[in-house]
Amino acid sequence: MKTRTLRKDKVNIITLGCSKNMVDSEVLSAQLKANDIDVVHENRKRDHNIVVINTCGFIDKAKEESVNTILEHVALKKKGTLDKVYVTGCLSERYRQSLEEEIPEVDAWFGTLELPLILKQFEADYKAELIGERMLSTPKHYAYMKISEGCNRTCSFCAIPLMRGAHVSKPIEQLVREAEGLVQKGVKEIMLIAQELTYYGLDIYKKRELPRLLNALADVKGLEWIRLHYAYPSKFPLEIIDVMKDRPNICNYLDMPLQHSSDRMLKAMRRQITRAEMNELIGEIRSRIPGICLRTTLIAGFPGETEEDIEDMKLFLQQHRFDRVGVFTYSHEEGTSAHALPDNIPQQEKERRAQEVMEVQQEISYEKNQEKTGKVFKVLVDKKEAGRYLGRTEFDSVEVDNEVIIQSHRKLTPGEFVNVNITRAYDYDLEGEVVE
């Protein structure tokens, strides 16, 4: 393609938002590279002349970060540092028309499913034979794997279906090939992601087929850890837990966002589940795998939420003692059914409630971590930072969960598994020594 410079084009891809966006950026990178276009992720050398910003449009803070990133690079274009600024992803999908009017300096805007159109800007061809191929932006020993796109759920607070469309599963054979390719690149751990994992297969196989997919992936040689993210609790297929129990390379870890505990709030959020049903599900999962790590997320400040609802949530945490919890403040999103409700809880109050809930979880997390002292865990070494090694147990996912600070008398390599005796425990991290 022609630009104002005579140098060869170099494309920098900036990814904002969730791991699903990261996978999209990695796929775009592989396609550009296959077309002999120089491409990098989050380039710190600043020797690129084109930028593609993959945006997030999920909640207010994410939208603000995306807009600020676009404006920052438009300013660089005005200075002559950049030749082209392209924008893709969820924010672009959702607000393209208004953004085009407000930031005309952006060279082109693309939605979430317009990869071939992005490639056309570079006079590049979409190479169908590269399906599943990605240029990893993560360390080479772990990767995210998106098993489906979109979502058919109707949660009242969520704008994801507006940006990602209806649920579309990838065929099992395609995902197995993708996993095999990742292993050949050195990947030891894959994290399965989707807007909703448990819905997998209903569209193409006419029934929930996540258990069958898990068994197929567990057969991939060299794949040591498989981790499940974003499982919807309503009509949860318990066969998933049975497969997890039977297959040693599927981590005893489940990320299952529950969002609230109060029946009144669950109904207003259109979660299709009651508090009693959640209690029963959690009990059944833990009875089948007593040591399983359960992660959940909760929302504070949904319209109509009361102090009693927050107290209910705190008691819920104390009852079930989740291993990992994230608490978010409600974001009033256009186009969602909850947008018709009055957003009558001030942001400061939402944040106070979220903090109050997290303080309960902090104590639970500390107590659970203390129970790990004196025990030996298999740990995956992630990196060396500030002169010390950092890794994770099977009960911890990247970035969102605990890290293990590893003391070792020998040199360790990222991607290596070591046995670590836990000697100290903190609120959200562990410390231990390698056991030879």
Image (cartoon, rainbow, N blue to C red):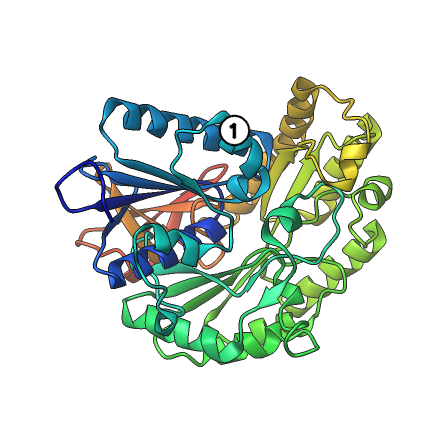
* Residue 242 drawn at (x, y percent): 63, 75
For image coordinates 50% across by 25% down, the residue present is 102
> In the picture, which quadrant includes the C terminus?
bottom left
Taking depth in this image into account, of 109 and 251 the one nearest to the observer is: 109
Q: Image quarter for residue 412?
A: bottom left
* Residue 271 drawn at (x, y percent): 78, 50
Q: Is residue 68 above or below residue 383?
A: above
For image coordinates 75% across by 61% down, the residue present is 281
Q: Image quarter for residue 153?
A: bottom right
- Element type at marker 1? helix
In the image, taking residue 225 as reference, residue 141 lies left or right, namely left
Determine crowd level at label 1: few under 14, some 14-19, many 20+ residues with C-alpha closer than 10 A. few
Residue underneath mark 1 = 101
Residue 378 in view, yes or no: no
Taking depth in this image into account, of 71 and 410 the one nearest to the observer is: 71
* Residue 401 drawn at (x, y percent): 48, 46
For image coordinates 40% across by 77% down, the residue present is 177
Q: Is residue 12 above or below residue 154?
A: above
Amino acid marked by disc 1: Glu
Taking depth in this image into account, of 10 and 365 the one nearest to the observer is: 10
